[in-house]
Amino acid sequence: MSGPGPRLFHIADRACWEEAQQAGEYRWSTRGARLEEVGFIHCSATPDQVRRVAEAIYRDCGSPLVVLEIDADAARRAGAEVRMEDGGDGELFPHLYGPLQTDWVVVARYARFGDRGLEW
């Protein structure tokens, strides 16, 4: 039996994620910006990228957060486009073009900032 396929990670406001679960899809690109504004959903490829993005974008966010772990193969099988693109400094980050279907999310972990940055 094979193990889990590749994963993508996305930091979400917990309330936005809970709303998405009711709707069946998540349409936020990043903090304060919707998919329709940006054109894609910002993701990370590794836990290290998640922590660095959290520190840069979410550190002062007062809202509860979750880290979504997304099955990249499920997204691709459903026809979603995932591109690895430059985050602005030469480092590649995955971008999901189109809404995130909630059934592609394998785990949603509550997250908070602790002594070592974002913990989930």
Image (cartoon, rainbow, N blue to C red):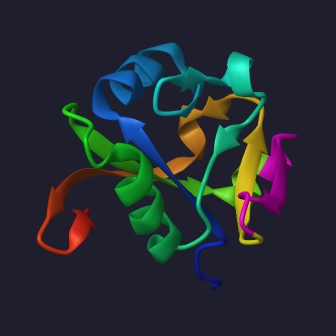
Q: Is residue 39 left or right of residue 57?
A: right
* Image location of residue 23, percent across then percent down: 51, 14
| Magenta run includes residue 75 | no
- Work out which residue is located at the far left of the displayed protein and give it: 115
* Image location of residue 60, percent across then percent down: 25, 41
Q: Is residue 88 left or right of residue 25?
A: right
- Work out which residue is located at the far bottom of the displayed protein and give it: 1
**Split into 4 quadrants, where in the image is the C terminus?**
bottom left
**Which residue is drawn at the image coordinates 74% and 49% (left, top)?**
95
As displayed, is residue 116 above or below residue 32? below
* Image location of residue 33, percent across then percent down: 56, 24
Q: Quadrant of residue 85?
A: bottom right
As displayed, is residue 8 above or below residue 34? below
**Which residue is drawn at the image coordinates 77% and 71% (left, top)?**
90
| Magenta run includes residue 81 | yes
* Image location of residue 18, percent across then percent down: 34, 24
Q: Quadrant of residue 91?
A: bottom right
As displayed, is residue 73 above or below residue 3? above
Q: Is residue 25 left or right of residue 83?
A: left
* In front of the other: 46 or 89: 89
**Which residue is drawn at the image coordinates 47% and 58% (left, top)?**
53
**Which residue is drawn at the image coordinates 26% and 36% (left, top)?**
61
Tell me the magenta residue range: 76-89
Q: Is residue 49 left or right of residue 118?
A: right
**Split into 4 quadrants, where in the image is the N terminus?**
bottom right
Q: How many tags in the picture?
A: 0
